[in-house]
Image (spheres, rainbow, N blue to C red):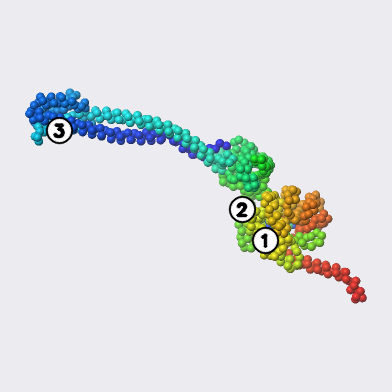
Amino acid sequence: MKTKLAPGSKPLSSSFGIGQLVAAATALLVAGCILTAFQFVSLRQSLVDDVQVQAALVADNVAAPMMFRDQQTASETLRTFRPPPYLMSIMVYDRQGKQFAAFAASGAAPDEYEVARLLASGSEESLSRIVAIKPVEYRSQDLGHVIVIASTARVWSGLLRYDGLFGTAAVGALFVAALVILKTKARMAKAEARLDYLAYTDPVTELANRRATYDTLAAQIIMQEKEGRQLALLIVDLDNFKAVNDTAGHSAGDALLRMVGEILRSVVRESDVVGRIGGDEFAVVAAPVRDRVEALTIAGRMADAFGRSFDLDGQQVFATASIGISLFPDDSRTLSGLVSSADIALYHAKAAGKNRFAEFRPEMTLETQRRVRIERELRRAMECGELEVHYQPQFDCASKRIVGAEALLRWPHPEDGPISPAEFIPVAEECGLINEIGRWVLVRACSDAAAWCRATATALTVAVNVSARQLVDDGFIGHVQEALRESGLPPEQLELELTESLLMEDVDKALEFMNTVRSLGIRLSIDDFGTGYSSLAYLQSFPINQLKIDRSFIRLLPNAGYTIASAVIALARGFNLSVVAEGVEEPAQLAWLQAAGCDVVQGFLLGRPMPGLAMHALLQLEQVESRIDAAWSETAKSSPLILRESG
Ligand code: C2E
Ligand code: CA
Ligand code: CA
């Protein structure tokens, strides 16, 4: 997409040029005026000084002739006196004010009235001429006056020359300035275009960035509203980007992002906008769309394009994406409403197992609100000790005795009633509270199990569920050891239940974790077996003790589901693992499992999850029953003897 300026903003370079040139010209003009005025004053002053000197010279030279009233010599002196061209007339007057001698260069001598006025004023300076009057003295005797009149033409011509020169220089300077401005303007326009590009483009994928995408969305909302049409916003989030980045490296991560950009571009129209709005989050603004079906079709095309492996510089990476869809105007008429609706839908797509798309439904908002409430309430419940651990007994198929118990969290909410762990565990996982909760369950389960064992002298196994967040928590193993140490439960009586999908998320990390756990003597069990990827190759390399067939297969027994159930049992035999069947509700299911060689069973048929005290009582009861059983069989064996003795 070609990125463009934000609406309403004008490039700086477009307003740069003429204005600067006009400013420079004005500055030159002002400077020219000041310099001209200065030049005028100095030229004129030098003329005034010259005229004064000339007048003094004349006064000196005519003093002697005047002393002797020798008019002829005085006139000759004036004639031989070579006056500079700017002097218009030189006149000598005696003490009585009568002309004694005169010389007029231009032939225009002042009349007698003017002379009288000049003599009375002493001097005159006007724009056209300068008059200097000097007394003629001989030995302090006043003989008369010399009047020298000079034209200011010299000043004006000097000023004209000066201004001509200055004007030429100014025009030259302006020309150079214009050239520089033009060049700067071109450079500015280029830099601006680059900045503009950077401000609106994602540097990795070269798609529109978050700002540009939302600008487009805002503009499209206005446009489609005017035309009475609909538009779709699709937010696409990669499911396993962090894993790709961590394992394949950042350059592979960038390559994947670019590929995703290309995929998204390839499934939408040229006019639709594809942008990267976050680390691994993309948005598509499809405008206009006819209806919801068209939006879902686009999402379907996207989903089809994912879910395969991508070649990133020779590395094969499997990538899936989750997509949230919102529609204008049905889901919201505003930008923020559309974005949050698509976000909520995306959240639901993720929660439903990722690698899928979800369109926004109004109920989703309620669900999201409930989720937020659960998160808040869960923190409180944890602090107030509202959570409980219940135990579901596990029975050995052969001996029919309790051999273990699975620890299951219970949350009896004071207002809402019991909240299922299936609902609050995912919330706890997402907000990180699971580490704290999981640690607490571990401590409780270990100490309860240790107490039962002491009371009943049986080696019972307690199974604790472990979630993905706990697996990557570096302190987890330490907490397990601490729980065992504090309770005194032998490690082989603790069993950790991990799900397949959890192990497949980061196989290397999971293997490392499992090896550490096994080296401590703790048992490992794969929960919900059969619902995940079930890779046989991995199963062989995982150091596990047990498989738990998922409830969904047991539920179908004995009429269906036996293919998978018997396959899992055979698989477990092959790998020398024990098998637990969970969710046994019907006697027929139990019978089938016993016949098929299942080791352990767990389900409502044999015992629902119960509080620790109830479990304790059950174990004691079982012990009493077994003692009675044993006593009876002993009695049966010895009764003939007794009879004989009594008889
Ligand atoms: P799960 O690990 O698969 O636990 C077994 C679930 O099956 C339990 O549900 C249990 O009450 C139920 N169940 C057992 N027998 C029967 C039966 O005969 N019929 C039926 N219909 N259900 C049966 P629950 O207690 O609701 O737990 C749900 C999930 O929550 C668990 O599934 C587990 O994944 C998670 N969970 C529970 N407690 C914890 C915990 O302490 N930590 C973690 N990480 N997850 C937990
Ligand atoms: Ca479990
Ligand atoms: Ca299970």
Point out the tag, 2 or 1, that comes first from the N-terminus.
2
- The answer for how far apart the CA atoms under marks 3 and 1 are is 123 Å
Q: In terms of secondary structure, where does tag 3 sit?
A: strand
- The answer for how far apart the CA atoms under marks 2 and 1 are is 38 Å
Q: Amino acid at mark 2?
A: Gln
Q: Name the residue tied to disc 3.
A: 134
The answer to whether mark 1 is within 8 Å of ligand 1 is no
Image-based side of 297 in relation to 62, left or right: right
Q: Name the residue tied to disc 2.
A: 369
Give the image location of residue 514, x and y in percent.
Answer: 70, 54
Q: Is residue 417 visible?
A: no
For the residues bearing labels 3 and 1, Cβ distance under 8 angstroms: no
The residue lying at 64 percent from left, 39 percent from top is 263
Q: Amino acid at mark 1?
A: Gln
Screen quadrant of the N terminus: top right
Pick the front one: 33 or 302: 33
**Mark sitting on residue 481:** 1
The part of the image, by quadrant, that contains residue 402 is bottom right
Q: Is residue 283 above or below residue 32?
A: below
Give the image location of residue 116, x and y in percent.
Answer: 13, 31
Mark 3 or 2: the one toward you: 3
